[in-house]
Image (cartoon, helix red, strand yellow):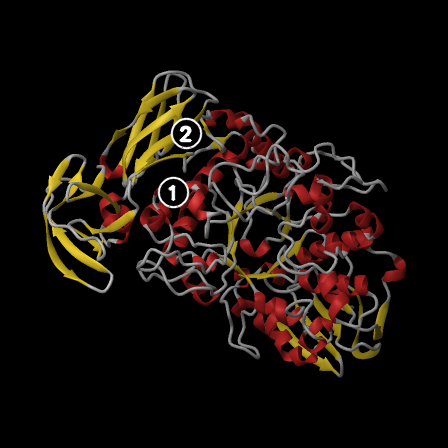
């Protein structure tokens, strides 16, 4: 066989390398020879036209030039503007649909001309249907059987797993037939979760392995889905660990870093190599390294459903971090093998675009890519009863697809939580559609966005910054008035033009899995000596800002990555949640629980429309002390911030006392003040005595 020397570029034309000379030629569909005629040429290709009155695809297509076979790359037909409409398939039956008596296999693959299902030593030939779908019914009980597809495509024979495979054996070597009804045997406890508005949400991000792997707890199933289900686990000092610790913190939503199948961890030997999981290979199958038995396709499914069930039972919701913007190792995974120029954005020469900086970017605007994403979201909501999605690099996904996702997701779960990274990383889509960036947030009414403006103003860019590049709460008073903008979730025209029109659009954060931890930023870019005290103040302000508070695992106790930033593959040393540190700084963790309760007690934070409450918020400066007055509906509160690295005494024209929830009040804290001593960078909240 020869390498590709030609490209099929439309339904009636192809181009041929100018170096190929011939006197007689045909384009062949299987063994049918069709004449063609010359159109024109450029410096690289000659262009030819042919007339074929049958479906062009679904054949072994090649050129016969002077009785010698030459291969034609049919992938380029995917770039034809009519391809999507001609081959869009809108039924919900792709994958292996199991019944006890038979299983129906269906795969969408218009470029293929023959496909077999491989089960054990048996080959079952599939029939090509309309819209490029291949189907096969195997009349036996295939529950738990593993399978592959043997695909004859583009002059190659390749073997792939099922793009719609609902589960797999270890390391995704084969897809698996599963009976999804078995998941219904596990109570989802959805009924225990009352509907929640986005503005009432609080989010805590964790990694399944990181949060359970530490040897200093009683968690039995360390690094596993079931490790996150274990009730009453404790640390060495008998503090709550794992699920019990999360329950103590009191967040409404727990965001799990990727749990859909990823490539670079050996599921049979998960301690050999570490990865966060942003190297996806499936949008339906769960990651097997977190399972007790990755070779049993049901194990990961049942254990993960138990995890969700346990969280619901303890009044916490589960958000999945999903990576639809790229695929791992594009040329060696399913989508790259079968139809690379359809599934991925590319230039006119078929070279992959790479605004994800991961080697490729998914073409979410293509109809069957969009359908794949919609079907994935539906599958995860319907079968595992998760409660929301965090979209990695959402700014690379088109607005139309994201709005279809939100409509679908809300039809399944009305209070589903949807948010993502709206970074502006690209400006190209196949159909010139708009992308889901922060700048286009008004086009995405159901989505919240990670607010890097909030992060930069409050904390600064990162631990490599100089002191003067740090944020307001790390001593940079250049952000004095920018802070007013950030505190209101960048939703009000103060200092800068507003970014959002609702508080719930803003995910407020100062730390996430990417980049340095808050502890490391303070340690390596400031002169602040009491780092834990400073973290506690920043966490308090984050909890009491307008928008949705977001915390990363360990932020609450001042965990360090030991000066490392992007620790996606650096192992437990740099990533695990340290329960020894929790024992050491348990008071810091306890304070988060208290801050979240404080937040709930202030009605203003539950109102989403800035226009309804902006008149109830005042900023007043007393030298280095900022008094943010919150005129709540039944009380007047003062959030006081000492901007200085020196202590300050603030004299007031009214009496105040510490704002403390009733269950925490003690006589020695119920003191009235007319002047208040504030330590350096202190953040405190008081209430008017007349309230």
Residue at the disc numbered 2: 148
Element marked by disc 2: strand
Q: Which mark is residue 66?
A: none
Quarter of the image that includes the C terminus = bottom right
Q: Residues within 10 Å of mark 2 (few under 14, many from 20)?
A: many
User: Is 140 situated above or below 465?
Assistant: above
Above-or-below relation of 40 to 71: below
Distance CA(mark 1)–CA(mark 2): 14 Å
Q: Give coordinates of residue 116: x percent, y percent.
A: 33, 27
Q: Looking at the image, which residue sits at the far bottom?
A: 623
**Quarter of image, res 63:** top left
Vertical placement of residue 533 versus 86, above or below: below
Q: Which mark is first along the chain, 2 or 1?
A: 2
Q: Between residues 4 and 206, which one lies in front from this camera angle?
A: 4
Residue at 79% x, 55% y is 588
- In this rendering, would 294 be left or right of 234? left
Residue drawn 47% across and 36% down? 382
**For numbered disc 1, what is the local secondary structure?**
helix
Name which residue lies at 67% across and 62% down: 542
Please say whether residue 672 is visible from this viewpoint.
Answer: yes
Above or below 257: residue 635: below
Q: Which residue is mark 1?
A: 337
Q: Is residue 525 left or right of residue 73?
A: right
């Amino acid at each position: 066989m020869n390498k590709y020397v030609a490209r099929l570029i439309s339904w009636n034309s192809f181009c041929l390398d100018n170096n190929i000379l011939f006197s007689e030629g045909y384009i062949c569909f299987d063994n049918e020879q069709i004449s063609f005629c010359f159109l024109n040429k450029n410096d690289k290709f000659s262009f030819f036209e042919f007339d074929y009155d049958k479906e062009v695809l679904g054949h072994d297509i090649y050129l016969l030039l002077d009785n010698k076979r030459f291969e034609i790359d049919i992938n380029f037909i995917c770039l034809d503007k009519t391809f999507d409409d001609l081959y869009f398939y809108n039924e919900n039956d792709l994958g292996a649909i199991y019944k006890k008596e038979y299983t129906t296999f269906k795969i969408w693959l218009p470029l293929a001309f023959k496909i077999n299902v491989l089960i054990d030593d048996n080959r079952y030939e599939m029939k090509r249907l309309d819209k490029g779908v291949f189907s096969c019914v195997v009349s036996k009980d295939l529950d738990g059987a593993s399978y592959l597809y043997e695909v004859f495509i583009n002059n190659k024979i390749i073997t792939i797993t099922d793009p719609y495979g609902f589960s797999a054996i270890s390391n995704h070597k084969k897809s698996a037939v599963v009976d999804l009804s078995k998941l219904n045997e596990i109570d989802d406890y959805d009924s225990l979760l009352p509907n929640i508005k986005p503005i009432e949400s609080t989010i805590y991000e964790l990694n399944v392995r990181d949060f359970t792997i530490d040897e200093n707890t009683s968690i039995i199933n360390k690094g596993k889905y079931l490790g996150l289900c274990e009730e009453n686990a404790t640390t060495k000092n008998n503090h709550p660990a794992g699920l019990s610790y999360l329950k103590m913190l009191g967040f409404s939503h727990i965001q799990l870093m990727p749990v859909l199948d990823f490539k670079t961890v050996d599921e049979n030997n998960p301690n050999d190599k570490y990865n966060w999981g942003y190297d996806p290979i499936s949008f339906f199958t769960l990651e097997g390294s977190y399972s007790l038995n990755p070779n049993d396709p049901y194990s990961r499914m049942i254990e993960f459903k138990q995890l969700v069930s346990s969280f619901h039972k303890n009044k916490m919701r589960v958000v999945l971090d999903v990576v639809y913007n790229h695929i791992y190792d594009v040329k060696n995974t399913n989508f790259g093998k079968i139809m690379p120029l359809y599934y991925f954005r590319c230039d006119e020469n078929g070279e992959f675009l790479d605004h994800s900086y991961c080697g490729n970017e998914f073409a979410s605007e293509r109809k069957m890519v969009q359908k794949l994403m919609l079907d994935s979201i539906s599958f995860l909501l319907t079968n595992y009863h998760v409660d929301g999605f965090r979209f990695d690099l959402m700014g690379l996904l088109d607005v139309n697809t994201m709005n279809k996702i939100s409509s679908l997701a809300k039809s399944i779960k009305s209070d589903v939580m949807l948010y993502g990274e709206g970074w502006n990383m690209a400006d190209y889509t196949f159909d010139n559609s708009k992308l889901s960036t922060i700048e286009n947030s008004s086009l995405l009414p159901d989505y919240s966005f990670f607010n890097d403006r909030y992060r930069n103003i409050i904390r600064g860019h990162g631990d490599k910054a100089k002191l003067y590049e740090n944020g307001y709460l790390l001593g940079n008073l250049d952000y004095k008035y920018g802070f007013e903008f950030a505190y209101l979730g960048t939703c009000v025209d103060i200092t800068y033009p507003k970014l959002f029109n609702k508080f719930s659009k803003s995910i407020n954060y100062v730390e996430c899995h990417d980049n340095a931890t808050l502890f490391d930023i303070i340690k390596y870019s400031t002169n602040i000596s009491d780092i834990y005290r400073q973290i506690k103040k920043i966490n308090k302000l984050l909890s009491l800002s307008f928008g949705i508070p977001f915390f990363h695992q360990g932020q609450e106790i001042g965990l360090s990555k030991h000066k490392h930033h992007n620790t996606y593959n650096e192992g437990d040393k740099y990533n695990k949640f340290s329960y020894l540190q929790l024992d050491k700084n348990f008071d810091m963790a306890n304070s988060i629980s208290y801050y979240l309760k404080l937040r709930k007690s202030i009605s203003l934070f539950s109102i989403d429309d800035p226009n309804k409450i902006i008149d109830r918020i005042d900023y007043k400066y007393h030298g280095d002390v900022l008094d943010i007055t919150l005129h709540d509906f039944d009380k007047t509160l003062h959030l006081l911030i000492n901007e200085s690295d020196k202590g300050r005494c603030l004299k007031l024209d009214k009496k105040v006392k510490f704002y403390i929830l009733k269950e925490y009040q003690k006589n020695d804290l119920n003191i009235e003040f007319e002047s208040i001593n504030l330590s350096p960078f202190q953040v405190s909240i008081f209430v008017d005595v007349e309230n």
